[in-house]
Amino acid sequence: MAELSRELPSRQVPATDFSYVGIDSILEQMRRKAMKQGFEFNIMVVGQSGLGKSTLMNTLFKSKVSRRSATSTIEERIPKTVEIKSISHDIEEKGVRMKLTVIDTPGFGDHINNENCWQPVMEFINDQYAQYLQEEININRKKRIPDTRVHCCVYFIPPTGHSLRPLDVEFMRRLSKVVNIVPVIAKADTLTLEERDDFKKKIREELSENDIDVYPQKEFDEDAEDHLINEKIREMIPFAVVGSDQEYQVNGRRLLGRKTKWGIIEGIITSLFLPFTVENVAHCEFAYLRDLLIRTHMQNIKDITSTIHYEAYRMTRLNDIKTYTNGMNGHESTACEM
C-alpha cells in the first residue's frame, strides 16, 4: 500500500481564500499551454539582390536563419525567374520555443523586364492559404493545423533617395491586399540623415497616393490605445535599416555593427574605420523594426493574417465552391426535366 501511494500523483491543495475567485489565473494557464505548444512565425523577404535581406534576417533573430551561397557567381545567384525558397529553424529563448520560417524570393527585380514578377509571390501566398483551408475542411482534420501561411512580408526598397520605382508600387499595391507588408529602406547608411528623412516622407506620400495600406493598417486598430501606438509607427514607416551579424566591442559593450570609413559610434564622430552600430537608433531604425516584428506586434501580425487576409481568401474560395455546386445542381435539374 505504501508503494502504491508513492506512485499516485500528489493532489494540489485548494485555495482557502473563498473571497478570491481566481479568474486571473487563466493568464497563467494560457501561458503554460502556449509554452508547451510553441509558436510559429513565417516571414517573407522580398527585394532585388544585394540589398542585405539575408543579413537583416540574421540580425533580427541573432541566428543564421537565412543563408546565401558565398561561392556562387553573379550569374548563378540570379535565377531566370522569381523563385520561392524557404528555410525553417527552431529558436528557443528563455524557455519559449518558436518555429521560424524565412521565405526568400531570389530573382525578384533582378531582370531587365520585371513585369509581373509579383505573380509567383502572390501564388505562393495563396497556395499556403489553400493548404490551410483544405486542412480546415477535412472531415478528420488534425488537432493542430500546421501553419505555413505567410504572416509578414518585409519589402526592401533600394536606397535611391528619389522615389519608389513602378515595380515597388505595383508589388505593394497588389500584395498588401493579401499579406501584411512592412516596407524598409535597405542599406540606409548610404544616405545622409537629411536624405533619409526626405526619402521616407516621399515614400509615405506615394503609398497614400496609390492607396497602399501597409502594416499596421489603420482600419484594423482595435481601440484608442492601439491607434495611438500604431500612429507613431505609421509616421516612421518605411524603416531605414542596416543589417549586420558582426559584433564589436564599443565602450565595454558588445554591439551589432558594421565598419565604415566615417567611424560613427554612439552618435559621436571618432577615428576612421570604426564600427557603425546597428542597434543605435541614431544610426538606423533597425531597433524599431525588431520591436514591431518581434517584441510588440508579432501576435497582432499573426491575428491580422488569420482574421483578415486568410478569412478574405477563405470566404472567396467557399463562395466559388458554392457557386460551382449550385451550377452543377442546376444542370442536373435541367437534364432531369428534359
Image: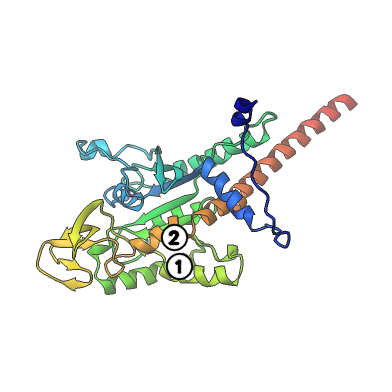
In this view of the protein, can residue 338 be seen by the observer? no
Label 2 sits on a secondary structure element that is helix
- Residue 233 badge: 1
Left or right of 287, for residue 331: right
Relative vertical location of residue 200 with respect to residue 63 in this rendering, above or below: below
Considering depth in this image, is 325 or 295 the residue closer to the camera?
295
Quadrant containing the C terminus in the rendered view: top right
Callout 1: 10 Å neighbours few (<14), some, many (20+)? some
Pinpoint residue 302: horizontal percent, then vertical percent: 53, 51
Label 1 sits on a secondary structure element that is helix
Pinpoint residue 327: horizontal percent, then vertical percent: 77, 35
Amino acid beneath label 1? Ile
Amino acid beneath label 2? Leu
Considering depth in this image, is 12 or 337 the residue closer to the camera?
12
Pinpoint residue 281: horizontal percent, then vertical percent: 31, 68
Considering depth in this image, is 194 or 274 the residue closer to the camera?
274
**Residue plotted at (60% across, 53% down):** 308
Q: Which residue is mark 2?
A: 292
